[in-house]
Amino acid sequence: MAHGLWQHLLHLGLLATHWPTSASQPTAAQGASRRNLIFMISDGFGQASEGLARAYMEEQTSPQGQHSWASLLDDMLVGTTRTRSANTWVTDSAAGATAFACGRKSPNGAIGVAHEGAACATVLEAAKMAGYATGLVTTARITHATPAAFAAHARDRDMEDLIARQMLRLMPEGSPGNHSVDLMFGGGRCHFLPQGNADSCRMDGEDLWQQAEARGVKTLTTRQQFDALAADAAQAEQLPLLGLFAKSHLAYSIDRDASQPTLSEMASKALALLNHTNSSSPSSSSSATRGFFLMIEGARIDMAAHDNDPAAHLHEILEYWRTVRVVRDFVEQNPEDTLLVSTSDHETGGLTLGRDPEYLWHPQVLHPVSRSAERICGELRQTDEDALAHNVRHMVLPKHMGVGNATEAEVAAVVRAAAEEQRKCRRMVGEVVSARARLGWTTGGHTGADVGLYAFGSGSDRLHGCVDNTQVGRFLAEYLGVDGSMDELTRALAHVVTEQPGFERTVDRRMHVH
Ligand SMILES: *[C@@H]1O[C@H](CO)[C@@H](O)[C@H](O)[C@H]1NC(C)=O
Ligand SMILES: *[C@@H]1O[C@H](CO)[C@@H](O)[C@H](O)[C@H]1NC(C)=O
Ligand SMILES: *[C@@H]1O[C@H](CO)[C@@H](O)[C@H](O)[C@H]1NC(C)=O
Ligand SMILES: *[C@@H]1O[C@H](CO)[C@@H](O)[C@H](O)[C@H]1NC(C)=O
Ligand SMILES: [Zn+2]
C-alpha cells in the first residue's frame, strides 16, 4: 500500500526516478489511530501584539478596576518559540515556515528547501503520504511564503509561478499528476491565471486554474460559492477544493466588506470538510481515514506591523482570536484525538507598549480608527494634488483615523508622505495613530524576539518551555506519527526542481519586507 503512494508521488512528477525499496517505506502512521492536527501561525505576532489586543479588549469590555481580562490564547500559553533562521538572527516568513514544515533550519527566502537548494519533506507532504487529509488556509496569497513552505519547494519565495504549480502538483513535464493538498482557502488567484487574463500576475501563459478544474479540483472564487459549500458540508466528497477569493491578499479585517470570507469562516468550513471527508490519497481508500493536518495562517497580522499600523494589526489579531475560538471548539468536540498548536514565525515591527517619557499608553485611541493605512494611502493616491491637503484634513484624519483635533504638523506630515510614496504614506498614517496611543515601533521589518507558543488538546502537555522553531516542526511530525518517514521522503525529493525558469531575484534577501 505504501508502495502505491511512492509510485503515486512519482507520477506527480515530484519524485526522482527511483523510490525507496519496500523495506524502507514509511510505516510510522500505519495502524495508528485517527489524529487531527491544526497548526495555526500568527505571522508577525509578538508578545507585545498579544498584550496590545488584550489591553484593548480589557478597556472595551471590563468594568473599571477589573484587570483580569485574558484572551483564549492567554489561556493556552505553554511556552515560547525561538525564531532564528540558518543564516541570521532575524528570520523571514519563508525560513520561519520551513522550520515548522520541515523541522529544519533554512536560509531566509527559501521555501521548503533546507540547504544548497535541495527540497526538504514537509509535515504536510508526509501526512498526505500517510493517508491524512490536508488543508492550508490563509489570508494572504496561497502562494505566499508561509502556506507555500508546507507544499512547495523553491529556492526563492518570489518564485510564486513555480510555487502555484507545485502546490497543485502540476509539474512542468505535464505528468498525469494529482493534487497533494486537499483543501486550500485564501487569496492569490493571480499566480494561477495565464498572462493576458486581467487578474494574472504570472510571467507565462499557463492556465493552472483551468488545468486544476480539468483534473477534478473544485474551484471557488466568490462568497456565494463559499456559502453554498456550507449547505453541502454534510454531503460526501467535495475535495480537492481550491477557494481563492481575491487576486492577491484578502482584505484587512478592518477594511473588509462581506464579499470575502473571514479567516474564522474559512477555518470553520475547512474543519467541517476535512473532518468529514476521508483523505483522497489513493492509499487511504483501503484503510480507515487517519484524520487531517490543517495549517491556518493569520497572515496579515504581519503586514499591518510592517506598516507600523496599530489599528489594522489589532483587527487582524481579533480575527485570529475568533479563529482560535472556532478551532478550540472543534478540539473540545473531539478531545481524544485532536490537537491545536499556535505560534508565530517571528515578531514584526519591534512593537512596544509605551514610549518616552510617560508610563502609559492609550488603547482607546485605536477604537475610532476605521481603515487600514494601506487603504487610506491607496485612496490618497487617487486624489489629485490640489485636493490632497483638504482630503487629509477633513476626511482622512477625522473620519478614517478618528483624529478630530489633528495638528497642522500631523496634516502636513501625512500630506507630504502621501505625495511621495505609498510605503512612506502607510508608515506615516500608522505613526500618527501610534504617537497618540504612545505605541512604539523599531522597524518596518522583522525582529529576532521570541514569540508565544500555545497548545490545546490531546498531547499538548508534551509541548512546553522555550523551544526552537525546528523543535515545533518536529513535534508536529511526531504527533502525526510521520516523523520516521521525513528523512526518507526528503531523499526521495532530492531531484525536485526548485528553480523557476527565467526568474530574476529583485530584492536583497537580507532586507526582504516580509
Ligand atoms: C469529526 O469526525 C469524527 C469521526 O468521523 C466524528 O466522531 C466527530 O464527531 C467529528 N467532529 C465534528 C466536530 O464534526
Ligand atoms: C486524482 O486522485 C483521485 C483519488 O485517487 C482520483 O479519483 C482521480 O481520478 C485522480 N485524478 C487524476 C487526474 O489522476
Ligand atoms: C471514510 O472511510 C471509512 C472507511 O473506508 C468509511 O467507512 C467512511 O464512510 C468514510 N467517510 C466518508 C465521509 O467518506
Ligand atoms: C485631542 O483630543 C484628545 C481627546 O479629546 C486629547 O486627549 C488630546 O490631547 C488632543 N490632542 C491634541 C494634539 O490636541
Ligand atoms: Zn513579514
Image: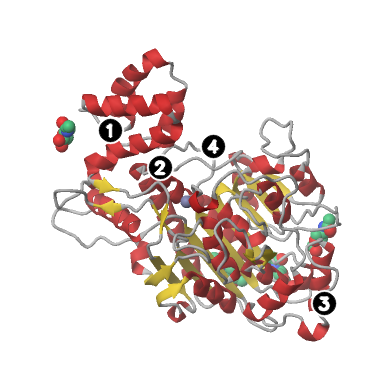
- Report the coloring of the rendering: secondary structure
Mark seen at residue 326: none
- Please tell me whether mark 1 sits on a helix, a strand or a loop: loop
In the rendered image, residue 368, in percent from the top left (x then y), is placed at: 29, 36
Q: 193 left or right of 416? A: right
Q: Name the residue under label 1.
A: 402
Which residue lies at the image location 62% right of the left edge and 39% below the top edge?
A: 222
Return the residue nearer the eye: 4 or 279. Answer: 4
Residue 307 — which label? 2
Quadrant containing the N terminus is bottom right
Query: Mark 4 — residue?
Result: 259
Q: What residue type is labelled 3?
A: His
Q: In the rendered structure, which amino acid carries the disc numbered 1? A: Gly
Please name which of the two marks, 3 or 2, marks the residue nearer to the observer: 2
Residue at mark 4: C-beta within 8 A of ligand 5? no
Q: Name the residue under label 3.
A: 3
- Which of pointers 1 and 2 indicates the residue nearer the eye? 2
Q: Where ligand 4 lies, by quadrant?
A: top left
Mark 1 and mark 3: Cα distance apart in space = 62 Å
Secondary-structure class at tag 3? helix
Q: Do the residues labelled 2 and 4 touch (CB within 8 Å)?
A: no
Give the crowd class for mark 1: few <14, some 14-19, many >=20 residues within 10 Å: some
Q: At 40% across and 42% down in the image, what residue appears?
A: 307
Q: Where is residue 157 in the image (x, y as percent from the top left)?
A: 61, 52
Mark 3, Cα crowd under 10 Å, few <14 / some 14-19 / many 20+, is: some
Q: Can residue 230 be seen in this view?
A: no
> CA gap, disc 3 to disc 2?
49 Å
419 over 489 or under it: above or below: above
> Looking at the image, which is closer to me, 399 or 376?
376
Q: In terms of sequence position, does the residue under pointer 1 or pointer 2 come before the other?
A: 2
